[in-house]
Image (cartoon, rainbow, N blue to C red):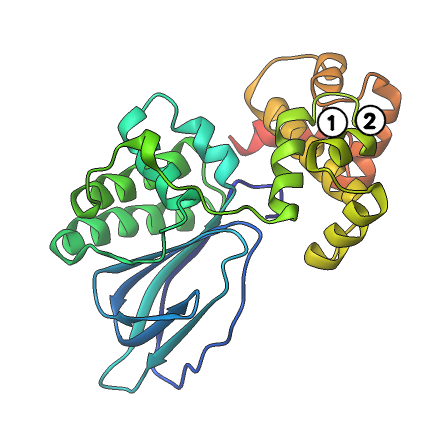
């Protein structure tokens, strides 16, 4: 995720063959269709693709997009990939919209696309404004604007989502890797021992390390470091906390070690990173 909670693909237009392929992501994905015809396969079910459809792909949800494309029938879409943990917290003040978000993210029955065709004009205006922000900011957009974009999308989704009792949501079975990531999300600011994760998941330490690397392509220790450094970057950008306090809040009581690690991962020291962020602002 390039140390950002949301990776946004500006609206893209294709006029040549787009066969698609099966794939999945560790994060969530939203695919919004502006123009085009074809189909999307999710969990072995096939859904028609047409203007105004929004597909929400959960983490590790296998899917394939096939668009029937020609000069007269282009495939125009907007895609975004995001960290659901971050936005679930960011949406806390907006309880009804957060409930919709959690259903999309966690529900076992979330495969049906949302038909937002009645809100197509509204969403295209929202997306156009966000595209403009991306252009003026050279691709860098404030996290507040990212949350606002998602709120607009959820506002449109609210009109297409059936009313549900939140307590009755049937949660999908989370993969082991998602459960590991969830545990780290809760405990990254603490001292982490593999034994604690193994006890939580009732798995052996060796199996946890093996399955995490197999499913993500990276080591568990690298993921923990990335998560901590990501939070450190946010605190450096958005608070006046001292580097010593930030080091402690992201799980590194030894500030000297934290500074060396931060420089290794980001390429500069926390002090220079904060100064560069302020200059960009």
Q: Going from the N terminus, do you reach mark 1 or mark 2 first?
A: 2
Say which quarter of the image contains residue 204: top right
Residue 188 percent across, percent down from the top left: 69, 27
The structure residue drawn at horizontal position 19% and vertical position 54%, both measured from the top left corner, is 116
Q: Nearer the viewer, residue 135 or 131?
A: 131
Q: How far separated are the C-alphas under marks 1 and 2?
A: 7 Å
Count residues near mark 1 (Cα–Cα under 10 Å), then give few for <14, some for 14-19, many for 20+.
many
Specify the label residue 226 is tagged with. Answer: none
**Which of the 4 image quadrants contains residue 105?**
top left
Is 280 located above or below residue 254 in the figure? below
Give the x, y percent position of residue 179: 62, 40
Residue position marked by numbered label 2 in the rendering: 259
> Of residues 12 and 164, which is closer to you in this image?
164
The residue shown at (75%, 22%) is 251
In the rendered image, which residue does mark 1 sit on? 270
Residue at 63% x, 23% y: name it. 236
Examine the rendering and report whether any part of residue 275 can be seen. no
Residue shown at 52% from the left, 47% from the top: 173
Q: Are marks 1 and 2 in contact (CB under 8 Å)?
A: yes
Side (left or right) of 150 relative to 280: left
SS at circle 2: helix
Q: Does 202 sit above or below residue 49? A: above
């Amino acid at each position: 995720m390039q140390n950002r909670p949301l990776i946004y693909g500006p609206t893209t237009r294709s006029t040549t063959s787009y066969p698609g392929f099966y794939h999945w992501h560790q994060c969530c994905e939203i695919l919004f269709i502006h123009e085009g015809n074809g189909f999307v396969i999710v969990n072995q079910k096939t859904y028609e693709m047409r203007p105004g459809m929004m597909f929400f792909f959960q983490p590790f949800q296998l899917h394939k997009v096939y668009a029937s494309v020609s000069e007269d029938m282009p495939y125009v879409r907007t895609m975004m990939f995001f960290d659901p943990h971050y936005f679930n917290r960011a949406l806390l003040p907006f309880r009804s919209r957060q409930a919709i978000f959690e259903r999309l993210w966690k529900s076992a029955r979330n495969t049906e696309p949302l038909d937002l065709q009645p809100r197509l004009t509204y969403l295209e205006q929202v997306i156009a404004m966000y595209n403009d922000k991306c252009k003026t900011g050279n691709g860098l957009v404030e996290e507040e604007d990212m949350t606002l974009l998602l709120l607009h999308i959820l506002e449109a989704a609210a009109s297409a989502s059936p009313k549900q009792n939140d307590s009755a949501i049937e949660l999908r079975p989370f993969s082991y890797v998602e459960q590991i990531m969830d545990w780290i999300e809760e405990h990254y600011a603490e001292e982490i021992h593999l034994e604690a994760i193994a006890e939580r998941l009732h798995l052996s330490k060796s199996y946890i390390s093996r399955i995490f690397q197999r499913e993500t392509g990276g080591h568990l220790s690298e993921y923990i470091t990335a998560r901590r450094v990501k939070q450190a970057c946010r605190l450096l950008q958005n608070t006046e906390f001292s580097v010593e306090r930030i080091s402690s809040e992201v799980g590194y009581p030894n500030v000297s070690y934290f500074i060396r690690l931060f420089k290794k991962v980001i390429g500069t020291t926390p002090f220079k990173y904060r100064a560069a962020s302020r200059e960009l602002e």
